[in-house]
Amino acid sequence: MRNKPLEDTAGTAAENAGQAARKDEKRKTFFPGKNRSPGSKPFNKPKKLSAKKLLLIILILAVLGGGGFGIYRLFFYTEPVDIATGTTKRDSITTVITGTATVEPTSFQDLTIPVAGVVKDVYVKQGDKVSVGDQLFDIDTTSLTEDIATAESNIANYETQLATYQKNLSNLTVTAPFSGKLTAPTDALAGDTVNSGAKLATLVDDSRMKLALYFSNAYLDAIKKGMSAEVSVPQYMSTLTGTVTAIDNVSYVTSEGTVCFKATITVDNPGSLVKGLEATATVTADGQTISPADAGTLDYNQASDITAKVSGTLSKLNVQDSLKVSSGEVLAVITNDDYTNQINTLQKQITSANLKLTELQDQLAECAPTATVDGTVISVRIEAGDEVTAGTTAMAIYNTDQMKIVADISETDNDYITEGMTVTITKGTSTSSSSSSSAARMPSGTGARASSGAAAASPGAAAASPGAAAASPGAASASPSGAAGDTASPSPSGSSSTFTGKVTKKSLEATASNGVAYFETTIAIDSAGLLSPGIYVTYTITAAQASDVVLAPIAAIQRTTAGTCLFIKSDTKPDNAVELGDGVVPDGYYAVVVETGLTSNDYVEIKSGADEGMTVFERYIKQNTTSGSDKTSETSNNAAMPSGGQFPGGYSGGSFPGGGSGGFSGGPRGN
């Protein structure tokens, strides 16, 4: 070693002497009784602490000590835990759907009072059996009968008025009643107002002419209708052939005192014959020519005045002198909107009156009602002599031999349901523990609809979320998500009765409740009169079955980031093991992905990924040591112990996946 220079050594010595002096000064300061120089003031002693200050210091030290202990408990202390395990096995499994619902009658009759009145008589009492057609009660109908008579009279009056207006409406169009020629036309023009009965023209048929002649009664049996006659017109000195078209047995007496009958002879008009021409005719009968007592005059075959049969405005007029027209040809059109308006009003009045009459007649029939179903009288709320108002409930009849329930089947279970499936119905069960079916919901209609029972997992789907509690005994499986909560319980009974039901209707439209879709399913029950409407029953439907399959405890199913897994105890790592990260899988166990199938209360079908006889992890059991004795408490099902704040399946935080809660102080054992 190289020696330091002398000057450095001297400096170090001086420095050491200074430090010694300072230490001596400190000793003098803290120990004033010693080495005090003469003439210096004595050093004051420290004051004693007060009781309050001393207590405060003690409390602060206690808090600091407790905090330290808490930190120790939080980060360094590990409570002892055990592991609950199960074993896979080969067995059969059945998935059932179960729930509760209220009983309703398949057929029923509710009766109310149709009109206010007095009850004349009641023919049945509660509990009576009735058949279709049996009379049930009578209501006094005096007032109702009077109302019906008034309604019928009003309808008849409306219909008479309607017929008149409809006829008037048809008379607005004037047509020719037969083919012929117009004569004596009116001077009115289109646009003029006409009154009912006003003459518009005369229509004559002069294509044929008629000749009325009187023959002696001596020839009454000789001259017949249809015989030929020779018509002679002196003015034209011509002879025409006619036909006897009518025989009238009148008593016409000539000036000579001859009693005669009338014969009408019709002759075709060649065009020159006109009304009023003198003419005569002879008829040949049995080779004898018979002549009339006197000559006669020609007349038109037909003649009619064309008149306006209703009042109004002439919107069209087609009448001219000597104008030939055909039968049905329009001669005039009259406008009058009042007729149309009146017809519309009357038709509405008639419709309304008929509805009122039908209502009254129905009420009359209901005043003496008969049973429309075979069944039992469930209730009677009227007595003879009661004054009742319309709408009062009178009685109810239910067919209790055939009842039904309407169950709401969750969307996960609906695929299992088919029409015709057999259903077991149980009456009188007591649900002391909550089942997995959700609370009964009350939609509009006749009664409660119980949500479907435990939902069976679809093949290939996970059966239960980690952290979820195992289903209660008697339930099918974990309830549908969002449906858990209140439990609908049947009324307790001393004994239970079982009935057979059948699915008769399966709804194709779902309704939503609490985030779950439900399908209404109607189940008919052969109740034999032993089920009352409104009571709760339990329904059980066998949805699916499988035999000779591998089963794992439902508590052992773990939902992880790798999928649905079992944690299998093994000395060696299985070929299908997956890595889930530190602290997820307990020491000595390996996570294997499995495919699940059917689910029951306690077991899940394992389709692939595991075999029978394997020990599987279910949950941790935390041990608490208190007062020198060991006590244990189970954690939530399927929850792996946390490590560094982590939970199994990759979940973190102070809760379990699937809705479980809790957490442990300290880390896991192993790993």
Image (cartoon, rainbow, N blue to C red):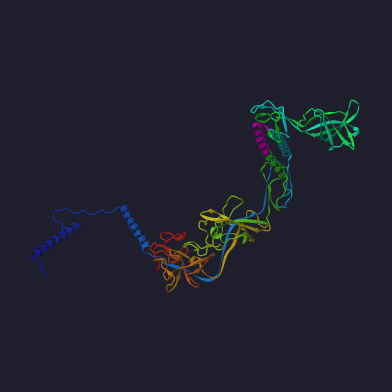
Viewer-closest of 203 and 529: 203
In this picture, is 164 found above or below 369?
Answer: above
Q: Where is residue 376 in the image (x, y as percent from the top left)?
A: 70, 53
Left or right of 570? Residue 522 is: right
Magenta extent: 331-352
Name the outermost residue toward the bottom: 571
Residue 138 image position (x, y, % from top left): 73, 44
Is residue 221 in view from this perspective? no
Q: Quadrant of residue 155?
A: top right
Query: Does the segment drawn in magenta span residue 436?
Result: no
Magenta residue check for 348? yes
Above or below, 148 relative to 553? above
Residue 105: quarter of image: bottom right
- Residue 530 appears in the figure: yes
Residue at the image point whose x is 61% and y is 52% from the top: 447
Q: Residue furthest left?
A: 6
Of 384 and 543, the residue lying toward us: 543
Q: 294 or 71: nearer the eye?
A: 294
Q: In which quarter of the image is the C terminus?
A: bottom left
Q: Could you tell me residue 294's position as x and y percent?
A: 86, 28
Q: Main secondary structure of the magenta part?
A: helix
Where residue 296 appears, as percent x and y from the top left, is 83, 28
Residue that sits furthest to the front in the current view: 237
Judging depth in this view, the residue of 399 and 212 nearest the camera is: 212
Tell me: residue 594, above or below residue 352.
below
User: So how many labels did they put on this image?
Assistant: 0
Compared to residue 504, the image places residue 155 above or below, namely above
Q: Is residue 24 left or right of residue 589?
A: left
Question: Which quadrant holds the N terminus?
Answer: bottom left
